[in-house]
Image (cartoon, grey):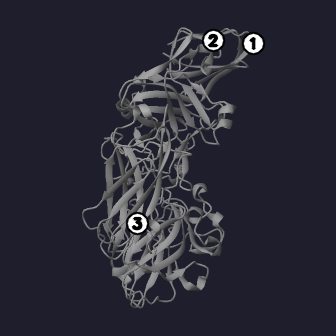
Amino acid sequence: MKKIYIALLCVLTSFAFSAQSSSNQLAKKHEVILEKIRPNFEAQPKGVVLWEDQFDNASDWILDNSCTYSGYNITGGFDYANSTPISSTSPCTSPGTVAIDPNTGSTAQWRFETDANLIPVGALSPFASATASNGYLFINSDACGGADGDGTPIFVTATTSAPIDLTGENSVVLSFSHNYRWWQDTRGVRVSGDNGASWVQYEITNNSGYPNDQNSGNPEITSIDVSADIGGQSQVLIQFYYEDNDFWAWYWAVDDVKISRKDLNNVQNNAAWIYGETTEFAEYGRTPITQMDLDWIVGVEVKNDGVNGQSNVTLNADFGSFTATATMTDTLYADSSSFVETLTDLSLIGTGVYQGTYTVSSDSDQVGGANFGDNVLERSFEITTDIYSLDGIDNHPSGTQALGSYGSYSWPTDASDGLVCATMFPFLNNDTINSVKALITTNTVADAEVILYIIDSTEFNTGNFGNAIFTSDLYLVTTNDVANGYIEIPVGFQNGNVFESLPITPGKYYAALELYSGGGTFDIGIIDDATVVQPGMSSAIWYPLDQAYSNGNAFAIRLNLGDNSIDNTGISERLINVEIYPNPASNFININSNSNETSELIIKDMSGRVVSSEKFNSMIKVNVDNYSKGIYLIDIKNSQGFYSQKITIQ
């Protein structure tokens, strides 16, 4: 089985697609190469800081790697990986800490580092905590964890060396900045109010699961209300613990740990959204005016991060040409969250980008008040004449855009050829698709190949690509495409000398790109907009010979709409007039070209392996007697252009 990491919104159940759980992951942690950072909606507590540490003085912490905590008295806590209460430590893996850290030559231990570039994952490096250059806490199983199950486990703790006095401070929040990639490793924080006699444990990940994407944020801010655990106590200790469970796991970097006074009244705006009523919760970055919903849902997720319950929690969203307002009728109690949203029709002034400001307030946390800094978020969308995209790349409010990618390099072992990246588009009215544009990564290599499918959502889910309403010829990525940062593939059919665009009736369709890299020789990646978490299967992956999986973000795969019938010479795949027959074939295939110059012929199987490569003038007869049965890809190139076609060998 393969590891596919999925970001889903828990409220979305409208798609009956399968997704792997954390219980059936592969035992090869480096099989997946994701370049995606999880959006982080948590904010630093706004209350007065009562105690803090930047890991700039090693004497402030006691380090241990002997698993002495196996006998701790754990009196409560929470397991975030499984969303269950916790009342015991995880057992230490026998026979003890024997993993050797090559950086020190000693058994593995927490280290105090100042080089933010030590993070062993490119997407998360350098560590972006506010004070990383002063020092941070670091453990790296990736460097010293050995192989899976080889008897070299790591279990380390870092405990404050001096008790913290919180006398008179009954409402407190523990927060810290951190950065990690998960692979079977356990990480968490413990607090004690009685100088270590008993502990409350908050576990972020463990080897039974993980609560988010494989990558954390950079930095990710974790805030925990520990009032009931250590509030008002004079002998408070904080402890960070990490175990790799005898796996070749990843790492953990921790910095800027604080205990803050919890504000009496503080509502936070944790997330904002706007989407059409029929889009299955998906937020489309660009919507053609011909496919607009009549009514749109505008809303936020509000959290009460204060001590007191909040009444009349209100959302005011202002997009300039229209506004939306909604108010909670119930009290929002401490440490709880709620959706506040409304259904509205959009009063638009025409096509263009609309940027809205979402402000939340309550009777006790008013606009401009002492705790108002975390009450406002922004969200953008665009209404177009002809461009349809789930991604909102280059339209997001300043400072919010986050990008990632998937491609032939994401699962190089068995998905370097045949991986499908897809975006779903709901059509409310009849329309026409004339091309598909996809933003590609800078590491894409010319001569990578792509097949485009326009396919009904049901057929995509079952992998019936043969039932696509449109399948392109094989598209060869050019050096100009790489330089431009995108590919664009015409959509439609040849009718004599005219290429006619594809008519579309109401329904839900995927624009799906099947990627071929020749076994990793010509890598290709599709940009992924990670700014907005998207629901269900609005953006999806088809894993070769497997099934469909949710992407959770938004592939930058865009439709260009409108009838754009053009002459045959405008279609790049047909710059060379080539005839290939018979198809299917069993003994020979004949290839005739109208060009008298030397052409290069390359034949590949569906894994991308080159089975034949030769040059010819005008015509060639290829013996396929010894070819295995199946589908092959034929590329023909010369100075005038290229031609690609699939052929079946029986």
Residue that lies at the very extreme toward the left in this rendered image: 330
Dividing the image into 4 quarters, which one contains the N terminus? top left
Residue 66 showing in the rendered view: no
Q: Nearer the viewer, mark 1 or mark 3?
A: 3
Q: CA distance from mark 3 to mark 2?
A: 62 Å
User: Residue 608 in the image: x percent, y percent?
Assistant: 58, 30
Are dots 1 and 2 in contact, CB under 8 Å? no
Q: Amino acid at mark 2?
A: Asn
In the picture, measured across the screen, residue 313 lies left or right of residue 357, that is left
Residue on which the image places disc 1: 597
Q: Nearer the viewer, residue 422 or 155?
A: 422
Query: Residue tagged by mark 3?
Result: 268
Q: In the drawing, does residue 509 fall left or right of residue 343? A: right
In this view of the protein, which residue sits in the foreground, 124 or 58? 124
Q: CA distance from mark 1 to mark 3?
A: 68 Å
Element at label 3: strand
Quickly name the residue at label 2: 577
Q: Nearer the viewer, residue 575 or 325?
A: 325
Amino acid on which disc 1 is placed: Glu
Q: Position of residue 234 (x, y in %)?
A: 41, 91
Of marks 1 and 3, which one's residue comes earlier in the chain?
Answer: 3
Are dots 1 and 3 in contact, CB under 8 Å?
no
**Proximity of marks 3 and 2: CB atoms separated by less than 8 Å:** no
Q: Earlier in the sequence, mark 3 or mark 2?
A: 3
Dot in front, 1 or 2:
2
Compute the Cα span from label 1 to label 2: 13 Å
